[in-house]
């Protein structure tokens, strides 16, 4: 028997002897999600914001989860854009010790749940580890009943890199909204 948390975690698929059945999420399955990995392009904006915001939210909710982030095209010596730091500082977050992390197979296998910012990131992960538990952040956390209907859920979170302060603030707001919905799913 194996279990698979499906998009949006509105159900779980249980497979026994080749038969697949949908079942409601249980406390045991929710507890299986203890290690969350966020993915974006460079690990300097979106996935970094998501990692540090979720760490803060998890602390506030006394949740014992591990959170990391990486980028599909992350450069080892990349720097965090000043605007990323500025919008996080407004949230009381100071990611001074953040080290840009390139996506790698051990990190993918480490995660119980991988949440990507764009569909291209999902494809990159699945090309490395086809059995990875990876989803688009906006689809996974979309309110029930909107997953298939709203095209915005399928587009992901736009990259603010090189954009205005407003672009970074909008990005942070979208990520934060998704994270509060995620907490409700995995609590």
Image (tube, helix red, strand yellow):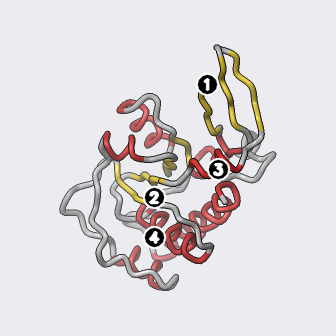
- The x, y position of residue 118, in whole percent, is 50, 47
Give the position of the C terminus as an image quadrant: bottom right
- The x, y position of residue 155, in whole percent, is 58, 47
Q: Tell me the SS state at disc 3.
A: helix
Most foreground residue, 2 or 117: 2
Numbered mark located on residue 30 in the image? 3
4 or 3: tag closer to the N-terminus: 3
- The x, y position of residue 40, in whole percent, is 41, 53
Which is closer to the viewer, label 2 or label 3? Answer: 3
Give the position of the N terminus as an image quadrant: top right
2 or 1: tag closer to the N-terminus: 1
Numbered mark located on residue 154 in the image? none
Instruction: Indicate the quadrant where residue 29 lies.
Output: top right
* Label 1 sits on residue: 1
Q: Residue at x 31, y 78 (%)?
A: 96
Instruction: Indicate the quadrant where residue 75 lies.
Output: bottom left
* Label 2 sits on residue: 159
* Label 4 sits on residue: 52
Residue 187 sits above or below residue 125 on the image: below
């Amino acid at each position: 028997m194996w279990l698979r948390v499906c998009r949006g975690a509105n159900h779980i698929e249980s497979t026994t002897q080749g038969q697949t059945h949908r079942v409601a999420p249980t406390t045991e399955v929710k507890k299986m999600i203890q290690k969350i990995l966020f993915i974006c392009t460079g690990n300097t904006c979106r996935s970094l914001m998501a990692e540090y915001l979720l760490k803060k939210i998890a602390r506030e909710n006394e949740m014992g989860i591990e959170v990391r982030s990486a980028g599909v095209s992350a450069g080892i010596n990349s720097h965090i854009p000043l605007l990323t730091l500025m919008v996080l500082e407004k949230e009381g977050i100071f990611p001074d010790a953040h080290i840009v992390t390139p996506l790698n197979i051990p990190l993918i296998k480490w995660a119980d749940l991988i949440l990507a910012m764009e569909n291209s990131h999902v494809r990159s992960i699945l090309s490395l580890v086809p059995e990875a538990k990876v989803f688009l952040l906006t689809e996974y956390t979309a309110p029930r009943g909107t997953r298939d209907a709203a095209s915005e859920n399928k587009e992901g979170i736009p990259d603010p890199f090189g954009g205005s302060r407003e672009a970074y603030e909008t990005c942070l707001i979208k990520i934060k909204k998704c994270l509060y919905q995620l907490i409700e799913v995995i609590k």
